[in-house]
Amino acid sequence: MLAGLRILIGLVLLASGIEKTLGPYQNFLYVIQAYQMLPGSLENMVAIVLPWVELIVGLFMVLGLWVPLALNATLIVFTMFIVVVGQALLRGLPIDQCGCFGQDIHIAPRVIIVFDSVTLLLTYVLTRNISKTSRFSLDGYFHQ
Amino acid sequence: MSKEKWTLVIIAVVVAAIVVIKYISGAAHVPIDSNAARMEGPASARVQIVEFVDFQCPACAKGYQLLRTYIAKYPKDIRIQLKYFPLYKIHAHAKTSVLYSECAARQGKFWPFVDKLFDRQQQWAPMINVYNAYNDMAKESGIDLTALNVCMATEGTMKPIEGDRQLGNTLAVSSTPTYFINNKMVVGSKSLQEELNTYFTEGK
């Protein structure tokens, strides 16, 4: 079950990463600008780099490659999402959709922050049960 | 092969796959078509802008005012073409506003009507019924309301609107406002300001 959860969380990151890396980075840059949290030059960098981080971490989670590392990266990514969305909600920024999965999937910030928090909690549970989480993984194959 | 090498191979394959898919789907060229009604500025202008907008989107109104400021200041340097990208799912008046605008265009009154549409967006956007507000703006723009109503009821009016939307989808436009400035994609009014600055303050 824990391995299934690992794969599921990985798929979420993977889907989000693929959608953003395949599209023009300017679309995600626009989403980042709406959160009004970073200076201009950093916004550009994050718009280009973050989708690739999501993609690679998601892939590692699904394949079960470097599982402890991938879990820690997932914790960092979701903590970051919660901070970014949380500050937007606290400041009352006019954001209708979180922009997390592109423009085709509309999720309100209030909904996504709950989803991110639950995912963060579940990922933490996975980090406390590495051996079960690492079932059906490439890590397991390489350790044989 | 070691785990480290497999990791590198997997990353390389995924990165290569994404790059190839992006390359195949291609950086499409944005055509500036011959629809004079929705075009403003000289053909020889050094800054050619194609903008995809939804008339109910607040950021589009902000971007439009910004563009107007630049056009007033540099009339010979900018040519702008407006394309429809109505967001039907999130804006209740997306369809009505594009229909009115297209019919205004057919009477040669596109820009006066669109100016008013964006100027008064905050007033009409929360309304349930926008017809009276739109008719007032149409009259003030010198539009013949009888001809406009006929145009609105004509099936073919939607054709150029859907054509623009389809073009936007092909160009990976996913939100509004999206601009193509000399074929470079720019999304949102903040990026628009930054890009225009590079042309008009740095002497690009």
Image (tube, rainbow, N blue to C red):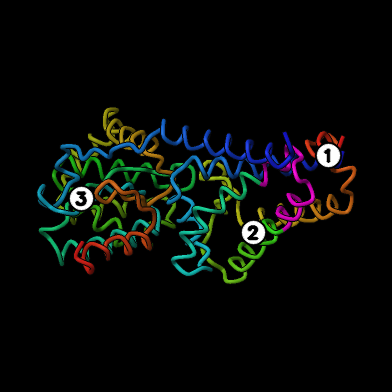
Q: Are marks 3 and 1 on the same chain?
A: no
The stretch drawn in magenta includes residue A60? yes
Crowd rating for badge 2 (residues with CA inside 10 Å; few <14, some 14–19, many 20+): some
Which region shows up in magenta? A57-75
Q: Among all residues in the image, which is located at the extreme top?
A: B155
x and y percentages locating residue A94 in the rendered image: 51, 63
- Kind of residue indicated by mark 2: Phe
The residue at 53%/33% (across/down) is B17
Q: Which disc, if any, is residue A81?
A: 2
x and y percentages locating residue B131 in the rendered image: 33, 48
Q: Quadrant of the C terminus of chain A?
A: top right
Q: Looking at this view, is B113 or A69 the one in front?
A: A69
Q: Please name the residue that numbered disc 3 is placed on.
A: B48
The residue at 46%/55% (across/down) is A29
- Kind of residue indicated by mark 3: Gln
Q: Quadrant of residue B169?
A: top left
Residue B22 appears left or right of B39: right
Q: Are marks 3 and 1 in contact (CB under 8 Å)?
A: no
Please tell me whether mark 3 or mark 1 is closer to you in this view: 1
Q: CA distance from mark 3 to mark 1?
A: 53 Å
- Kind of residue indicated by mark 1: Ala
Residue B184 lies, with reference to residue B32, above or below; the image says below
Please tell me whether mark 2 or mark 1 is closer to you in this view: 1
Residue B155 appears left or right of A22: left
Q: Looking at this view, is B129 or B171 the one in front?
A: B171
Crowd rating for badge 1 (residues with CA inside 10 Å; few <14, some 14–19, many 20+): many
Q: Please name the residue that numbered disc 1 is placed on.
A: A3
Which subunit holds the residue at mark 1? Answer: A
